[in-house]
Amino acid sequence: MSDNKQIQAYQGYEQGPTCPTSDVYSLLLRLVRNCPWNRCSFCPVYKKQKFSMRPVEDIIKDIDLIRTYVDRLLEENALPIAFDQERIHSVYTSFEIRDRVAFNNAVKWYATGMTAIFLQDANPLVMKPKDILFILRHIKESFPQTETISTYARSSTILQLPDGVLEQMHELGLNRIHVGLESGSNLVLNRMRKGVDRAGHIKAGKRIRQAGIELYEYVMPGLGGIDLSIEHALETAEALNAINPDVIKIRTLAIAPSTELSHWRLRGMFEKPGDSMIATELRLMLETLDNIESRIKSDHILNLFETISGTLPQDKEKLIGIIDRFFELPPQERILYQIGRRMGFFKEPQGMDLSPHMDQVRLACENYGVTIKNVDEILDRLMMRFV
């Protein structure tokens, strides 16, 4: 007992609900549960979930447990069986594994090279700096071969860290931070309850980069609604110009039914732009990006164009050209592309006619009764699968 609170025994290895697409093969270490802010109007991920910090002792036990399983896999030279479920089950039984979640994570990580670790959940840097430094030090000692340690962080949390702490974290292996910028417009940020303004985003982004840590900034086309679409595009680009992040990640807005934004939409308080307006917004943002050397990534099915991927400034015109090709399509072909893209068949308009899936897309459009007037409404329903 301590302070009249019962100390809960270690419950085993924990894994949070989400990670960036770049970390699907990373070892997932859960430092905190859920999101300490959890007020963003558009985000459905942690709603109705209570935030808590895991005891440092439990996190260390997770790390040690993975280390034990990895050592056994190395002893058994298990790489050839890593994706054979029957043989993995045999190894699982022979090891007398008590924690299946930890074992599965160890096998996945072992099979994919053990090069990257992602710290969960939404904002682990809200922990005491001394605790994070202790955890990073133990990771470094346990897994010296690891090349990348990354995490999500809020700009407001970065601004609250004492001077020099980010640099210490970087020295101990934290070399990538993912930040949800979402927008550079104060009107949009305030409406969406991000808890930080444009100046705070810029200051935090610069602090991360100055510490030598790779910065991934996420932007959300469509988040400004129809009324703030242009401002959202222009001011987001201006914020990115000020930060010059290593990577700009595009995540198009999709409105989940459980969010406050969904309720606003039902009451007529928010009007979501359709694909064509969002494409125009994205083009305007790309046009306005200037004097930065960021890499652009659009690696998500929610995005209308997956191949908007390149490095600024040299690839800027190529990226804009992908959007222009969409607008050059006749209206009916544009609809086929929109539906086929969200079915996972297309990545960009170019070469669409050569796809072996065109008949499937046409049939889907017939079955759904897709027209120019209702295509965005139907796409909203399709996109719910990916939120």
Image (cartoon, grey):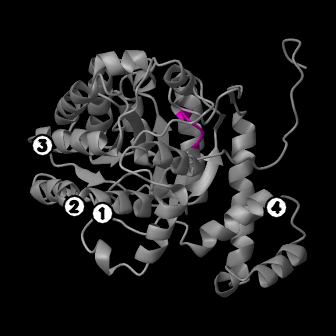
Q: Please state the extent of the stretch shown in magenta in the rendering.
A: 120-124
Q: Crowdedness of circle 4 by 10 Å Cα count: few (<14), some, many (20+)?
A: few
Task: Measure how far apart labels 4 and 3 are at the Cα level.
Answer: 49 Å
**Quadrant housing residue 101:** bottom right
Question: Mark 2 = which residue?
Answer: 329
Which one is closest to the eye, mark 3 or mark 1?
1
Question: Taking the image as drawn, is residue 381 in sight?
Answer: yes
**Identity, as a three-letter code, of the amino acid under mark 2:** Leu
- The answer to if 122 sits in the magenta stretch is yes
Q: Earlier in the sequence, mark 4 or mark 3?
A: 4
Question: Mark 1 = which residue?
Answer: 333
Q: Which mark is residue 287?
A: 3
**Identity, as a three-letter code, of the amino acid under mark 4:** Arg
> How far across and down, in percent of the image, does residue 23 sit?
50, 56
- Front in this rendered view, residue 130 or 275: 275
Q: Earlier in the sequence, mark 4 or mark 2?
A: 4
**Identity, as a three-letter code, of the amino acid under mark 1:** Glu
Question: Mark 4 = which residue?
Answer: 100
Q: Crowdedness of circle 2 by 10 Å Cα count: few (<14), some, many (20+)?
A: some
Q: What's the residue at 87%, 17% (across, down)?
A: 5
Q: What's the residue at 38%, 43% (across, down)?
A: 373
Q: Main secondary structure of the magenta part?
A: loop
